[in-house]
Image (cartoon, rainbow, N blue to C red):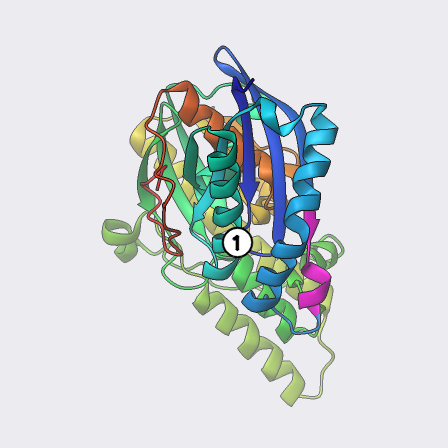
Amino acid sequence: MPDATLVLGIETSCDETGVALVRIDGDRSELLADVVASSMDEHARYGGIIPEIASRAHLEAMVPTIERALAQAGVDRGQVGAIAVTAGPGLVGPLTVGAAAAKALALGLGVPLYGVNHVIGHAVVDELVHGPFPERVMALVVSGGHSSLLLVDDTVRVTELGSTLDDAAGEAFDKVGRLLGLPYPGGPHIDRLAREGDPTAIRFPRGLTAAKDQADHAADFSFSGLKTAVARWVEARQDAGQEIPLADVSASFAAAVADVLTAKTIAACRRHGVDTLVVGGGFSANSQLRELVAVRCAEAGIELRIPPIRYCTDNGAMIAALGAAVVRRGLPASPLDLPVDSSMPLTHVLA
């Protein structure tokens, strides 16, 4: 018989096929299994994600990943009481594969289906680590596609305060990595080099931090200008026949990104009277961001919650956690013909 407290989550917004199982226990959620199959190696040769390759990889990995998660949790599929799946944002092809699998499972098992928001899942996964959110939290979600500030009430009511106007933080890292001749994805390589360099060696610009930007873009981000400044600095050195100090460039660039993200986030917490900050998304694994946000939160008296790195990249646990939060609050299930939405608004927890 299905267990109404057992939620299976499926994540396929990009190149990771993630499946997890969460059990609801009162106001808490317990992670029973979390399995991820990645096709990143297949995309690395192209220097970016190829949607068609990702979609085929999801098709091949879906059933084995579900079976591995069920075995890891020690349950069979007949015990699952609800299915949660990423409905957006993300790549249409990969999203469609995950949604089709979730619909088939929900229909076959006779259990409710919940199409949930990938970006919000990056924040709510922290409930599996540090327990239920307080009534109101600020969430900074930073990844390859998103740099967003969200005001979150009762876990499932979300107000988008700001976002990136051009490149997201992770996207900027990948583009600068390519500029510096680093392998794809560039983020981890820049992070590694930055730990060996001097973050004060080069003063790169901080986008949207001037006084004139505060009225309309106080909570927004822009990293395109920073990326261009790095490119011009590197080109000038190359034209002069000088060596590029990769560690110092990486450290100075990473410091500029972390400075903007943390300064704007702390300011938003103060404006809205929020004393708990949750940081999530793939880019939240960045060491300079983690170190600086910890320092600035401590100075401001703000409680900082960042999940372990394994929960920062795309995974099924974040979708199962958000699905459990939705089930716990009695929100209506999604229709079995739910559409995927590559640009799903961040104010929509459910499709």
Mark 1 neighbour density, 10 Å: few (under 14) some (14–19) many (20 or more): many
Q: Residue 127: x, y in percent? A: 53, 24
Residue 118 makes an appearance in the image: no
Measuring from the top left, give residue 189's x and y in whole percent. Answer: 71, 60
**Residue 64, visible in the rendered structure:** yes
Residue visible at 69% across and 63% down in the picture: 248
Relative to residue 47, is residue 187 depicted above or below?
above
| Residue on which disc 1 sits | 97
When the figure is inspected, residue 305 is found, relative to residue 28, above or below; the finding is below
Q: Identify which amino acid the numbered label 1 is placed on.
A: Val
Quadrant in the picture for the N terminus: top right
Instruction: Look at the picture and state if 236 lies above or below 108.
Output: below
40 or 167: nearer the viewer: 40
Name the residue: 47% across, 44% down: 86
Seen as rendered, the residue at the extreme left is 215
Task: Judge from the rendering whether residue 113 lies leftward or rightward of residue 159; answer left or right.
Answer: right
Residue visible at 42% across and 19% down in the picture:
328
Q: Quadrant of the C terminus?
A: top left
> Quick one: 104 or 331, which is closer to the camera?
104
Magenta-colored span: 36-44
Give the image location of residue 266, x and y in percent.
42, 37
Q: Name the residue at 46% across, 51% down.
A: 260
Circle 1: element type = helix
- The image quadrant of residue 247 is bottom right
- In the picture as drawn, the residue positioned furthest to the front comes out as 108
